[in-house]
Image: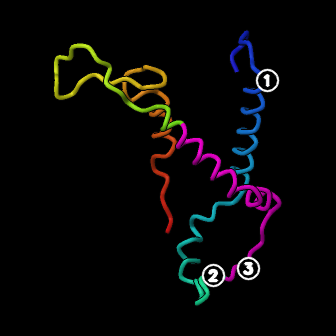
Amino acid sequence: MRTGQITDPRETRLRDRLAAIRARSEKSSSWRASTQYLSRLVNRSGFVPVRTRLSREDLAFLAAAREEVIAFAELGTRLLDMHRPQEAGGISSDPDQPIRRCRACMWRWPCPTFKAIEESTHGVRELG
């Protein structure tokens, strides 16, 4: 937080909540390396019998992970719905590629919000 800046208690709560989610996620173990092996163990019922030792941090992460991921996906979708390009109007030197601006913040397209979402999700691999 910047010094001398007036803070909104709602912003402080949101920042604290996001920091807690991030900390809990960073403390838990990654299952990425195990998923290739585990995917070969799917039984006829479509399940993988897993026997493992989980730390307290892993359990805390797993307890809320599904709901938090759904909430973040919804947040990303809502932000994308708000931050979409629109033609800026006016005269352009290239009529085939008119200047576009974001509908929400009016920055030149792609806007900083769209870029942040794109950068945050770039390289996130889909499993399935």
Residue holding disc 2: 47
Front: mark 2 or 3: 2
The image shows residue 105, relative to residue 36, as above or below, that is above
Query: Is the residue under label 3 in contact with that under label 2 (CB below 8 Å)?
Result: no
Q: Residue at x 77, y 72 (%)?
A: 53
Q: Which residues are magenta?
A: 49-78
Magenta-drawn stretch contains 59: yes
User: Which disc number belongs to residue 9?
Assistant: 1
Residue 15 lies, in percent from the top left, at: 72, 32
84 vs 2, nearest the viewer = 84
The disc placed on residue 43 is none
Q: How many marks?
A: 3
Three-letter code, disc 3: Arg
SS category of the residue bearing label 3 = loop
Query: What is the x, y in percent for residue 102?
Result: 41, 25
Q: Is residue 119 left or right of residue 13?
A: left
Report the residue marked by disc 3: 51
